[in-house]
Image (tube, coloured by chain):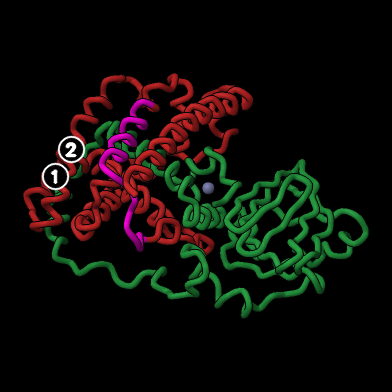
Chain colours: A red, B green
Amino acid sequence: MVLRDQNLSSENAKNLRPLDDLIKRIAENQDQAAFVELFEKAGSKLKAYAMRCGALDGEAEDIVQECMLTVWRKAHQFNPKTASGTTWLYTIVRNKRIDMARKTKYDVVVSDDLWPEPEGEDLETDIERDLNGKIARTLLHGLPDEQRQIVYKVYFEGKSHSEIANALDLPLGTIKSRLRLAMKKLDTLAQEQMTWLIIILLTNF
Amino acid sequence: MANYHPSDELLMEFTAGQKQDALGIMVACHLESCLECRKRSQVFEQLGGEILGDSQETPLSEGLLGKLLSRLGESPAPAKETDVQGDARLPRPLRRFVPGYFDSLPWSGLSKNIKEFTLPLGDNRYVAKFYKIAAGKELPVHTHEGNEFTLVMSGQFSDDAGDYKQGDFILADSDIKHQPRAGMNEDCICFAVMDAPLKFTGFFGRMLNPFMR
Ligand SMILES: [Zn+2]
């Protein structure tokens, strides 16, 4: 799996801000040079993500194209106060992937149903956004590999517990207990964040 | 604010884009009214961003950037499925699937006090319905084959395990035998998503069962 390089994601963390600036340049000036730079920074990662979620090579490139076009058209909707550029890109590729994976007439649900475009103001603040990022990174690096591996499987493969058990050749009980441990940790972190939210709301209003 | 929420695990699967089905719609409806879960979901989204950033790079075909640049002038995508209006009193994720509001739905009667409306969200995994339980009345005792997720849309109900009000998100698994009773003052309308048809126990249950399919 991907978990080889522990330092990779702190490197990536440092590279988050430039993505934000590129997206802003696209939003404000329809800046094609910024678009090309963003494509060069993110395109191959978007493709890697789509393929790990099960898309074939050609399908993954279609997803990359649709994502990048969405970035071009909706860059003005990017709000750096609510999320980093990378997280915004993540939500776009997630949505494109599920919309393009719909195959049968029973697949009636589209990403716009699940994540309608926001109607009102977001409550987020810069502090909160940075905190979110910090929490996510702490979490990802705080989890032991064996728990993180299962979390990744959820993100990429949407497999059931028993399918994961088969894939990793481990008893079902082990998968369940590892996921439970990972979730407990996530929950602690999410609660910490809630505490911050309350503090922020109290000081802002 | 709701007292009962989706589990971390379900919320994470939802946020990771692994629930594009009736259950996903239910989670989305809960999120619309639950700030706490929206916050939790944002943590998971950020996690997705980190994971995307961590992805190894997969080489792209040579012509891809050129193709993309030539498409920048294309007019935005045509009208979407979700451009349907629907009733503004319903949560947005459900609106386009419901013809009107609760008072004008073509309810079908399981009995005088219990009505149902099947939502056009069904797939091979889940059945999705609204139930309307008349004020003060109860569903027959039943167990579940598989899981049943319930979101209270309006009114209240209670069972042995607790009292539930609008916005509450409840999971009953196959071990639970319960008998939901609507609050005394108003009808209770619930959105239910289940793995398999309900199985009623007891005589009344057996009578009802054929209609539940
Ligand atoms: Zn909630």
Both marks 1 and 2 on one chain: yes
* Left or right side of A15 for A130: right
Residue tagged 2: A17
Q: Residue at x 41, y 56 (%)?
A: A115
Q: Residue at x 55, y 23 (%)?
A: A169
Q: Are marks 1 and 2 in contact (CB under 8 Å)?
A: yes
State yes or no: residue A130 in magenta: yes
SS assignment at label 1: helix
The vertical placement of B6 against A193, above or below, is: below
> Identity of the amino acid at label 2?
Arg
Give the chain letter at badge 1: A
The vertical placement of A55 against B120, above or below, is: above
Residue A114: give x, y in percent of width and height: 45, 57
Q: Which residues are magenta?
A: A117-138
Instruction: State which quarter of the image contains the N terminus of chain A.
Output: top left
* Left or right side of B25 for B130: right
Give the chain letter at badge 2: A
For residue A173, which quarter of the picture?
Answer: top right
Q: Residue at x 27, y 55 (%)?
A: A66
For disc 2, the neighbor class at 10 Å (few under 14, some 14 to 19, many from 20) is some
For residue B183, which quarter of the picture?
Answer: bottom right
* Left or right side of B209 for B189: left
For residue A112, which quarter of the picture?
Answer: bottom left
Residue tagged 1: A21
SS assignment at label 2: helix
Q: In whole angstroms, how far apart are the C-alphas of marks 1 and 2?
A: 7 Å
Residue B150: give x, y in percent of width and height: 64, 54
Label 1 near ligand 1 (CB < 8 Å): no
